[in-house]
Amino acid sequence: MANKKDNRKENIKKSRPKQQSLFSFGKVFIVFAILSGLAAYYVFNVLTTPPPMPDMDLEAWWGPYPITQNPDVSIRPFKIEFSDVVVNDLRERLLHRRPFVPPLEGAGFTYGFNSDFLTRVLDYWQNKYNFKDREQFLNQYNHFKTNIQGLDIHYIHVKPKVVDDVEVVPLLLLHGWPGSVREFYEMVPKLSKPRPGFNFVFELVIPSLPGYGFSQGAARPGLGPAEMAVVMQNLMKRLNIDRYYIQGGDAGHVVGSHMATLFQDNVLGFHTNFPALTFHMLANVYSFLGQFWPSLIEEPELQSRMYPWSEKTMSSIEESGYMHIQATKPDTIGTALTDSPAGLAAYILEKFSTWTNPAFKQASDGNLLGKFTLTHLLDNVMIYWVSNSITTSVRMYAESFSVKQLAYKLDEVPTRVPVWGIKFKYELLYQPDALLKLKYKNYLHSTVVEDGGHFAALENPEILADDVFGAVEAFREFHARGSQPRPNPNSPPKTAYDFTVKDINGKEVRLAKYKGYVSIVVNVASQCGYTDNHYKQLSELYEKYASRGLRILAFPCNQFGGQEPGSPRDILAFAKNRSVKFDLFEKVEVNGDNAHPLWKFLKEAQGGTLTDAIKWNFSKFIVDRNGVPVERFGPSTSPLELEAYLAKYW
């Protein structure tokens, strides 16, 4: 018995350390869990708590010292001049350039600007570019300079001629790099002339950003995008424009976004063709995590613009080499480009190839002439050459990545200013609306374009101008709703413009954007006997009359013979294979209890034969500039037969 008791005591003693060990591990686990939870909460708080608004010096002096006590703040007329001295020097440099190293066989633009094609560009510049004609072209609008914070700032000012019932609203147009004010020339007449269906038109202010073109660069470090935003606000103040709209892309987007953040009482709306938050930590985290579950942050049809992550990252690395140089050693590259017109042309124009469409780098000419003309491209290069501004322009990258600039965290500071983006397919960076709304609390809409790249104003001036009009109309309605009762959602629609629909990518589209256009609304199918003929003729109509204000709104429908069975992606691919450029919307029903409200409205406004029901695929309605359905045609009427009817409504 004694031995048994002793054994039992010994076993108890042996078990006690194990109990103590288990108990200690449990305590450690609980402490670790608590600390992990607190750390996670802290990180979440850091990521989701917006930083404070930075305190900007609105009168910072960027000119040379000593500070002028009574600076000349007058507004002075300015003319761009291609003097004989400058032109002769340029031609001499082009004539006596060294022979280029031949390009590798089949390399295209994959190693950079193809030297064989560069020879053609430089020969054109030297012998065929008409310097006097282009000087006159660039001076067709009124140019001015005025001193802002010690810097002479250049800008173009276009005031429209209007009748009494058209309101003039100010619009600030901001260019990027390696662009200039030249990018906007084709857009100016589209924005400054009244258009049917809109009761406003734009007074345009188009500045050269500080250090770009004919605007003076800073005399000391520190003039980054945030400081440029202050300069631009002070320019508008100098022009006695207190409240205004902004449009910008690339660097113009960054400066415009900062203005919409810093000066929320002055900026009425911000339109961007580069909708992105480059330095928003949470947006970047979501973008990274989205590669594992893309549908969490973007619709399937648009995921290919962001993912696969590895492919997009490698492409970004390939296209961002210039940025690393300009962000670290801007004056070194600036010196090389300042001294060589051949180098300047190659450095700038290479971007107009690969940034317009990355596939263009496979072509020996970079497909530059597929989208642009040499004359237009060299206009932009001439602005850099004549003004000797390439060095001061690339310094902006060094300032953008400075500790001071990053500490502002302006991409993370929210703004209540309404924002509207347009997303061209081959833009350098893509972010879904859900991420953009992290900063832009009133992000109203994204227009998704199945073509186009970084230089939207020069490549697609009509698309961009149309979108700006639609955006500003939405901004005006946004502000009107702030002081007026919202319309009764139960009130019956009076025009087609009262409806909101979804496009083929699932994005909401307010049909009010088509106000002022004559539209054809048609139900389409991919497998119908009418398909080939109708798609072809609809495209012909659009190509022929888009410039006169025709728009085509195509709604896929599977109610007739099951001839539109595909997914939105299938339908979009089908349309792209036929080079369709008119607008595609979501698949809808056009008859029955589940008929889309727009189609119910169309049928009520323009009844059919025997019954109002849509009889088959490719039934067509003409909607006039005021949104009133005025004509109806059945599937047997070919689209080209509508020409005579459309002529009544131009």
Image: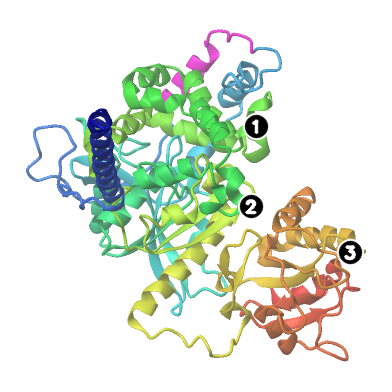
* Labels 3, 2: front one: 2
With respect to residue 606, does 364 lie above or below?
above
- The label shown at residue 528 is 3
State the separation of the CA atoms marked 1 and 2.
Answer: 23 Å
197 drawn magenta: no
Tell me, for residue 301, which label it has, or none.
2
In space, the residues marked 3 and 2 are separated at their CA atoms by 24 Å
Q: Is residue 643 above or below residue 235?
A: below
Q: Upstream in the sequence, badge 1 or badge 2?
A: 2
Q: Which residue is mark 1?
A: 360
Residue at 70% in and 13% down: 105
Image position, residue 217 (x, y; %): 27, 34
Tag 3, which secondary structure? loop
Q: Please provide percent x and percent y for residue 397.
A: 34, 32
**In the rendered image of this protein, does residue 158 appear above or below residue 617?**
above
Where residue 187 sits in the image (x, y, percent)? 52, 53
Category of crowding for the residue at label 1, using alpha-carbon neighbours closer than 10 angstroms: few (below 14), some (14–19), many (at least 20): many
Would you say residue 99 sits in the magenta stretch?
yes
Q: Is residue 459 visible?
A: no
Stretch in magenta: 85-103
Q: Within the image, what quadrant is residue 601 found in?
A: bottom right
Residue sitting at x 78%, y 58%: 566
Mark 3 burial class by Cα count in 10 Å: few <14, some 14-19, many 20+? some
Mark 3–mark 2 CB contact (< 8 Å): no
Q: Nearer the viewer, residue 72 or 25?
A: 25
Alpha carbon distance from label 3 to label 1 = 35 Å
The answer to whether residue 358 is seen in the rendering is yes
